[in-house]
Amino acid sequence: MDQTPRSRFSVIDIVKTPLVVAVALIVFLLFLGEYLSPGFASGQQILRLLIVAALMGIVAAGQNLVILGGREGIDLSVGGVVSLAAIIAGNLMAGENSGIVLAIVGCLAAGALVGLINGIGVTLLRIPPLVMTLGMLGVLQGLLVVIRNGIPSGRAAPGLSQFVTQPFLLGLPGIIWLWIVIGICMAFLLGRTMIGYRIYAIGSNEQAAFMAGMPVKTTRILLFVLSGMFAAVAGICLLGYSGSSFANVGEQYMLPSIIAVVFGGTPLSGGKGGYTGTMAGAILLTVLQSILTTINIDESGRQMVFGATLLLLMLFYGRGKALRA
């Protein structure tokens, strides 16, 4: 007699799992898109959606780490870093493959520097993450306007464009393989390393982690540095996808990167969650955005939908208390 309740509760738990919900919604939206626009769920279209989702997912990887670290951690500067990296990469490459390595090094250094400043402001100066990263976003936006005044800047190297858009291995573009590798590395980092243990411990209970002798400040600074570097990688790949860059090209990733993390089951309180769900959340948002474009919803309308989606997610997943050590 007691087996039936356990079975029922098990099914309920599965249904409430954010990853399961995200995958179910992805399938539903693909069918809906195919109904609204025949060919929406074709193999070629799904491949294009995965490329766009990979760009968002790479940005969300860094966002995921910052949020997992707790203390209402959030990085609103990722859009500015994406734009900055795209412009730096475009200028250093100037349409030549010989500039790819220098561009990658320069962009990663720029992203790490922005993350370092964010991390120092949050940990040492005790500025709230929301305020610190929003201020940094304003600084980056002003810097980009000064540099290029919104004019397209630089060109992607042919090798980079091929890596992002053309089949690389088993018919999949290189950026999708890069995203898979990032997903594997994130799973290993969070689940198999001391740094991952510290991230969850600090996000769950910062005071307890500090009393246990963990380097709380150093770890939190590292999370912001990694967030900046992931955003820089996304900026490089975005340049390869579009061919050129604009001053505000990365703004589209700020809000969706947060929604993807929350949709994947990581509450904004931090301390629990992972990156697998975030990857599914990035795919879900990309499919949703494509459907909104299909039914002729403009950019402002899409932002309203994303904002409402985040509020709804906060009601279901984002308000949960972090785990306590």
Image (cartoon, helix red, strand yellow):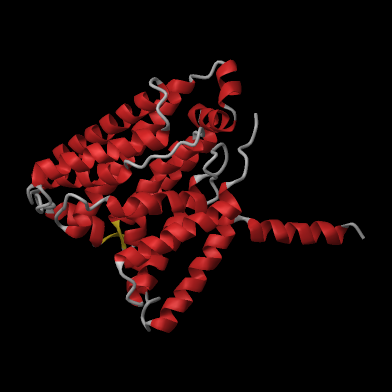
Residue 315 position, x and y percent, is 58, 54
- What's the residue at 30%, 36% (across, down)? 135
Answer with left or right where residue 118 lies relative to residue 249: right
**Which residue is more in the foreground, 104 or 141?**
141
Looking at the rendering, in which quadrant would you find the N terminus? bottom right
- What's the residue at 71%, 60% (across, down)? 12
**Is residue 38 shown above or below 282?**
below
- What's the residue at 58%, 51% (across, down)? 317
**Is residue 117 shown above or below 318?**
above
Residue 246 position, x and y percent, is 16, 53
| Corner quadrant of residue 229 | top left
| Corner quadrant of residue 121 | top left
**Which residue is more in the foreground, 35 or 127?**
127
The reply to whether residue 37 is in sight is yes
**Is residue 281 shown above or below 64?**
below
Answer with left or right where residue 324 lies relative to residue 37: right
Answer with left or right where residue 121 lies relative to residue 312: left
- What's the residue at 47%, 60% (across, down)? 308
Hey, which residue is sitting farthest right in the picture?
1
The reply to whether residue 49 is in sight is no
Residue 4 position, x and y percent, is 85, 62
Looking at the rendering, in which quadrant would you find the C terminus? top right
